[in-house]
């Protein structure tokens, strides 16, 4: 049973940076072959995909974080990271890590929320003040 656990959230001012981590314990062989992704949910809004990475390291981002966020993974540690730079209040929300079988990172980003796919962590809160 794969179980993702997020860490690294916190409170920062606009323009600041945070680095989120997600370690997916359970079945290392499964995790290495799956896509991993970051998703967020702001108060009163629907959950949305932020970034995803496939087992080969190819990445996808939503437009609003392109150039500011960097997703990466260390398969040796079954861990995924999200380096978030130049944060703004619009980035505030609960950030969730999820892992799933996928066709590509873009497929994961577009379908994991919409189709309820994958195994999800409990989330870590990110708060950005102006």
Image (tube, rainbow, N blue to C red):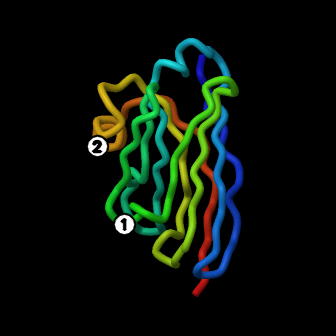
Q: Earlier in the sequence, mark 2 or mark 1?
A: 1
Pointer 2: what residue?
110
Q: Residues within 10 Å of mark 2 (few under 14, many from 20)?
A: some
Q: Give the label on residue 107, or none.
A: none
Q: Is residue 50 left or right of residue 26?
A: left
- Name the residue rendered at 46%, 74% in the picture: 90
The residue tagged with tag 2: helix, strand or loop? helix
The residue tagged with tag 1: helix, strand or loop? helix
Q: Is residue 44 left or right of residue 76?
A: left
- Name the residue rendered at 42%, 53% in the picture: 50
Of the pair 127 and 28, the residue shown nearer to us: 28
Q: Mark 1 and mark 2 in contact (Cβ < 8 Å)?
A: no
* Residue 113, position as x, y percentages in the image: 35, 43
- Could you tell me which quadrant the C terminus lies in? bottom right
Q: Quadrant of residue 73?
A: top right
- Name the residue rendered at 66%, 34% in the picture: 23
* Residue 117, position as x, y percentages in the image: 37, 31
Pointer 1: what residue?
64
């Amino acid at each position: 049973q794969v179980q993702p656990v997020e860490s690294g959230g916190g409170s920062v001012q606009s323009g600041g940076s945070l680095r989120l981590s997600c370690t997916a314990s359970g079945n290392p062989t499964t995790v290495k072959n799956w896509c991993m992704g970051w998703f967020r949910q702001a108060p009163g809004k629907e959950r949305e995909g932020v970034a995803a990475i496939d087992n080969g390291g190819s990445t996808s981002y939503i437009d609003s974080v392109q150039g500011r966020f960097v997703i990466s993974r260390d398969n040796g540690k079954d861990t995924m990271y999200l380096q978030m730079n130049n944060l703004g209040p619009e980035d505030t929300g609960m950030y969730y890590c999820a892992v799933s079988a996928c066709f590509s990172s873009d497929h994961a980003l577009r379908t994991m929320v919409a189709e309820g796919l994958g195994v999800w962590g409990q989330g870590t809160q990110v708060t950005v003040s102006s």
